[in-house]
Amino acid sequence: MTHLRPDLPALDRIDTPALIVDAVALHSNIERMAQAAAARKVALRPHAKTHKSPAIARRQLAAGAVGICCATLLEAEAMAREGITGLLVTSPVVGRDRAARVAALNRVSPLTVVVDHRDQLDSLKTAIVAGDPTLGVLIDVDVGQGRTGVTTLQDGHALARAAAADPRFAFRGLQGYAGHVQHILDPMERRAAVRAAAGPVRLLVAALAAEGIGCPVISGSGTGTHALDMAGPFTELQVGSYVFMDADYARVRQEDGKPLPFAPALYVLATVVSTNREDRVTVDAGTKALAVNGPTPSYFIGLPAGTRYAFSGDEHGAITLPPGSPRPALGTRVLIGATHCDPTVNLHAGYFAVDPMGAVTALPIVGRYGAMGTALS
């Protein structure tokens, strides 16, 4: 049960569409994941790509996270400027300019990056100068997603050996992120997919161990498979969406049939701007306010159960209510549950977090594409 209501007086002063966070649900989600990981003695390195918020990252660190994952170098630079530490850039960094930025960032905030090709390692070598701190490195392993990562045991082995032998690097282990597994709806199919995804990681760990090369960090997992991945081989979890949840994760069930143990915390506040059609009303939240990938919103606050949303252009959405339900009047405020939370966040410049007393705190969103001045200074 949420304390959020679209008619809270503090929300009246917020122009719509706007991104709203249930501060109670957010705190509960952060604590619940931290407690689960601690109980299984697995580290958490949550993903900033979900929230892009230094304030939320600080809460995750305070709850026990060992650091924060960043999908892009831009995110890592933005987080470091706000004092967030223990950063891991989870996408390979390509190009001399970006390698130089990695080296610059590592001088002021210890950093770990992933590589999946020898050329990436060579570019980073060139950027590191005498007197620089060592740069943390993980080998990115393709575990079935077909996106990034080494695709053969031989390539992974050679790349890990090269990183471990170079004094400019601190070889820390492997990354194996199975993003393609997180949203599998059938619990047993998801379990089988988790087992298959872990296979290449286990093989490479064993091959390196045979040469005396340890992998103290094996990073991966996600919200949809966190409970399964705590059994290994992962030493740390790159969970992200658990802080907010969304329409897609609302469909995912655990093996006991229950939903994932996290509450919806992210909504878009919208205003009813047209009521002329008998079968629907129109709100001012369309594709510029809610991500279009994934299912449409499945939960609302201020509207009856059975309400449906459909995109109706850049600035508008169509709200269809169950038969017999009274239509909201012009100007009515509604809260629409997030579609895919990560790209929904990326559409906005900031959040408004609402606490149980109805007080609102503005939280900026950082590290979005197009930000001027990308280098840390």
Image (cartoon, grey):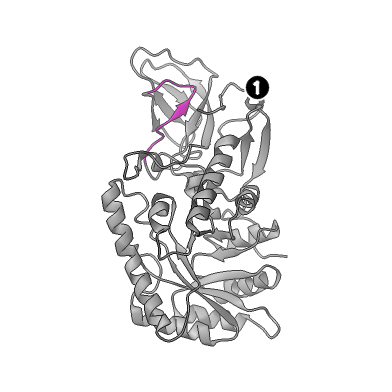
Residue 303 falls within the magenta-colored stretch? yes
Total residue callouts: 1
Q: Position of residue 203 (x, y in %)?
A: 34, 75
Who is closer to the viewer here, 291 or 215?
215
Q: Write down the region rendered in magenta.
A: 295-305
Residue 128 falls within the magenta-colored stretch? no
* Residue that sits furthest to the front in the current view: 39
Residue at horizontal 52%, vertical 35%?
267
Q: Position of residue 155 (x, y in %)?
A: 38, 81
| Mark 1 lies on residue | 9
Q: Position of residue 139 (x, y in %)?
A: 46, 74
Residue at horizontal 47%, vertical 16%?
328
Residue 107 appears in the figure? yes
As drawn, 224 above or below 267: below
* Residue that sits furthest to the right in the current view: 377
Residue at horizontal 46%, vertical 31%?
316
* Label 1 secondary element: helix
As drawn, 195 above or below 289: below
Who is closer to the viewer here, 322 or 45?
45
As drawn, 15 above or below 48: above
**Badge 1 amino acid:** Pro
Q: Residues within 10 Å of mark 1 (few under 14, many from 20)?
A: few
Question: Is 172 positioned to the left or the right of 276 in the image?
Answer: right
Question: Is 93 positioned to the left or the right of 141 in the image?
Answer: right
- The C terminus, quarter of image: bottom right
Residue 21 appears in the figure? no
Where is residue 6, by image quadrant?
A: top right
Q: Position of residue 42 (x, y in %)?
A: 49, 59
Helix, strand or loop for the magenta stretch, by majority: loop
Residue at horizontal 58%, vertical 31%?
16
